[in-house]
Image: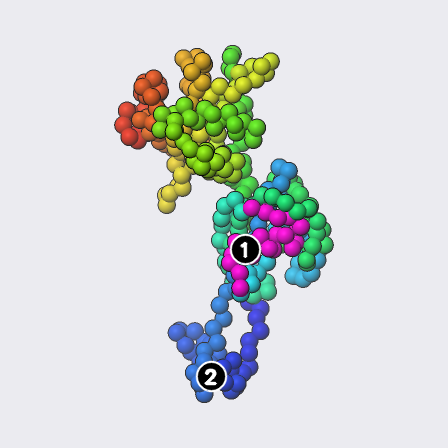
Amino acid sequence: MASTQPAYCLICGSPLTTAVVAGRERLVCTECGYVHYLNPVPAVGLIVEMDDGVVFIRRGHPPHEGEWALPSGFIEADEGVQEAARRECEEETGLKVELVELFGVYSFPEGPPTSGIIVFYRAKPIGGHLRAGDDASEVRIFPPDQMPPVPFRTHRQVLERWRRQMAGQKCPEESHPEFTIRPARPEDEPRVLELLRLIPPNAEMDDEALRAAAQRFRECREILVFVAERPAGNPRVIGFAALSIVRTLTGQRAWIDDMAVDPLYQRRGVGAALLEAVMRQANRMGMTHLFLNPRRGNEPARAFYRAAGFRDEHVGCIHLG
């Protein structure tokens, strides 16, 4: 670990000497008792998602000058971690960003340049212009399958986690005689929110609740939304199902809390096709059980859930293996 250690006491100016304190050899002052502790320095890093890729900067200064890395930097003493993340991103990439989620916390006791802890966020641009700044000599968007070599271990770790999560969310379209099942797209948001209110507990959702649901639809990678769309000649979303990924201490669980079908298209196999698509995706992601609350649906929906294998109780579960 590279570090600069003082020779004199920061309190009284007397020479420091070495002694064992709290089980470690540390610098201490024999005059006033000051102990010089070497603690990790906090830093922030960002996975900025833009144009179906991730924003990288080419470092303009050591360490690793000329190599690609995620936007990152140390937290100033007078700022919070989220404030530091937004500042570092704007300084290095020219982008103003919204922090979508905390995505990982990693330690780097090996440096460089000193021992630290780095907090990574997923972020999306909300303003500014993509340009290299601060200690970056270049900035570029790389697609997930063409990312450059990265010198920092913590950056490699968080990118690998991000790639795994992205891969787990990919699922093919499924064609049926009267409709297609596919992952939701951003332009599906208004129609999904309209269908969301067909679910009895959601019927009285106010504007604030709808805005919150819209934000989760756009930003939360732990929620995968599938839609059923009628033929391309006159396309319209006629149903949807939302698969939530719940993380536990022992792994991940799949959960369906919201599923709805346009009344004009009920009893045509739309709900069954959506449920089967969700189950197949949960299987692809390594889930073993799918949980659902049948009582959120009306009586026809509850009958459908019973026919699909869910018990009519507060939380039903089916085995996916």
Q: CA distance from mark 2 to mark 1?
A: 36 Å
In this rendering, does residue 150 appear at all?
no
Q: Which mark is residue 23?
A: none
- Mark 2 or 1, nearer chain start: 2
Give whichever of 272, 93 is nearer the camera. Answer: 93
Q: Amino acid at mark 1?
A: Glu
User: On the rendered structure, is 206 left or right of 173?
Assistant: left
45 sits to left or right of 302: right
On screen, residue 135 above or below 25 = above
Residue appearing at x 45%, y 14% in the figure: 265
Residue that appears at 48% across and 32% down: 224
Measured from the top left, where is residue 16 in percent x and y?
Answer: 50, 83
Kindly state the secondary structure of the residue where label 2 is placed: strand
* In this picture, residue 302 sits left or right of residue 59: left
Q: Nearer the viewer, residue 262 or 204?
A: 204
Q: Does the magenta portion include 84?
A: yes
Label 1 SS:
helix
Q: Quadrant of the N terminus?
A: bottom right
Q: How many marks?
A: 2
Circle 2: residue type: Cys
Counting from the top left corner in percent of width and height, residue 135 is at 68, 58
Instruction: Look at mark 2 in the image and give the residue it sits on.
Output: 29
- Classify mark 1: residues with Cα within 10 Å, few (<14), some (14-19) or many (20+): some
Using the rendered image of the protein, determine whether residue 41 is visible from the camera's viewpoint: yes
Q: Mark 1 highlights which residue?
A: 83
Write down the region rendered in magenta: 78-98
Q: What residue do we see at 42% from left, 26% from top? A: 197
Residue depth check, mark 2 versus mark 1: number of the one nearer the observer: 1
Q: Kindly identify the residue that appears in the image at 56 percent across and 65 percent down.
A: 114
When the figure is inspected, residue 267 is found, relative to residue 156, above or below; the finding is: above
